[in-house]
Image: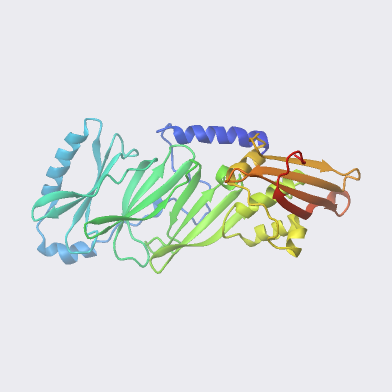
Amino acid sequence: MMTKFGRVVSILVLTALVGCSKAAPGQNANAGAQANVEPVQRTAASMTNEAKAKDGANEPDTTPLFKKFMTEKEKALGEDRKLFFFEKEDLDRDGLEEAVVAYGPSNDDLTDIYVLKNRDGQIVQLGDNLNSGGYAVDDIKLIQLDGRDNPMIYLGLTNWDSMTGFNLFELAGDRLENPVYSASATGAGEDVLLDTDNNGRFDRYEQRRYSYDVFYYEVTRTYTLQQGEFVHTDTSVQLPDYPASPEEVVEEYLALGKIDEKLPQNVISRRAELCRYCGVHPGKNVPQVDDGTMQSLILGLEEEGSALKVKEGGSGKSATATLVWTDKSGKQKETIFELAKTGDGNGGRWTITDMSAGEKVAGGSS
């Protein structure tokens, strides 16, 4: 974990980045991935022509019709919008080809993305612009998922700085569905679609987080395709060294409990070290501190109605930490943590030995 000063600077920079509509164009942030994990742009297999060969033999060439519509659309969008993507495919496997088209100022800034359909010689647009979110689209392709027959429209998302993600669309009849959207809301993170067995069909994706939404721990969530649907199957957390002070012990204990619903074994083991009392009385008196309060505590920011103060005993082997915060109903809550330093010499570690919680009494400890 970074220092509190570094975290404060980081969160201010990230907040500014999320508010910007576009920073300097950059690359998708997959350079730090494992050796067997490649960026989705490099692993995406091109669509086979089986459907076209099967159903296209009896269908007249619709390309001129699509191109006429696209030319008119490009004119309507304005001079700064050019056509950068056009691909025909039977998206819903009904034997008739649709077309996916994308326009924008450049091929890595696709602002207008549409699905077109031929209805008895007339080209119609299905649904609205697929680029309707807060992030830019810098990549588009048709892909296949394991266990699903219909092709998917893949949109690569970016803020041109510290975030990459993706959005998937599928055509069901004349209705466009959005089965997966994966991108960090904080503007920092890396979401990657994966083909783990290299069969040309994607079967997994990872969400890699490291910002204030996960209290600055490095967290990777894995979603695996099971019976045609993505299911959260694993979470990994890279833990720093054991905290050195009573204050850091309390902060880490609370933060790790909120970092994810599916806690990995190393986090469970660390929390058991941080709070020996909790193994004896599981779940008892554990304060349900909101994310905003936790972020302020970890960053060392002052937040009205919340504070964590520590008083060490004279021997240096005991301490009392008092946490005060305001819950959603506006009531002030207070939890008192008793800590002890176990072991001796450099191997001594602080651990929570008891805690008591309740509403803060006026004029009480703070």
The C terminus lies in which quarter of the figure? top right
Residue 1 shows in this picture: no
Residue 194, given in percent of the width and then of the height, sits at 44, 57
Q: Nearer the viewer, residue 312 or 156?
A: 312
Residue 112 shows in this picture: yes
Name the residue furthest bottom: 227
* Left or right of residue 283: residue 71: left
Q: Nearer the viewer, residue 275 or 307?
A: 307
- x 58%, y 35%: residue: 10
Residue 30, given in percent of the width and then of the height, sits at 48, 47
Residue 198 sits above or below residue 22 on the image: below
Residue 166, given in percent of the width and then of the height, sits at 40, 49
* Left or right of residue 321: residue 219: left
Residue 101, given in percent of the width and then of the height, sits at 24, 46
Looking at the rendering, which quadrant does residue 72 occupy? top left
Looking at the rendering, which quadrant does residue 80 occupy? top left
Q: Nearer the viewer, residue 169 or 363?
A: 363
The N terminus lies in which quarter of the figure? top right
* Left or right of residue 79: residue 323: right
Name the residue furthest right: 315
- x 70%, y 50%: residue: 358
For the image, the number of numbered tags is: 0
- x 66%, y 41%: residue: 298
Name the residue furthest front: 362
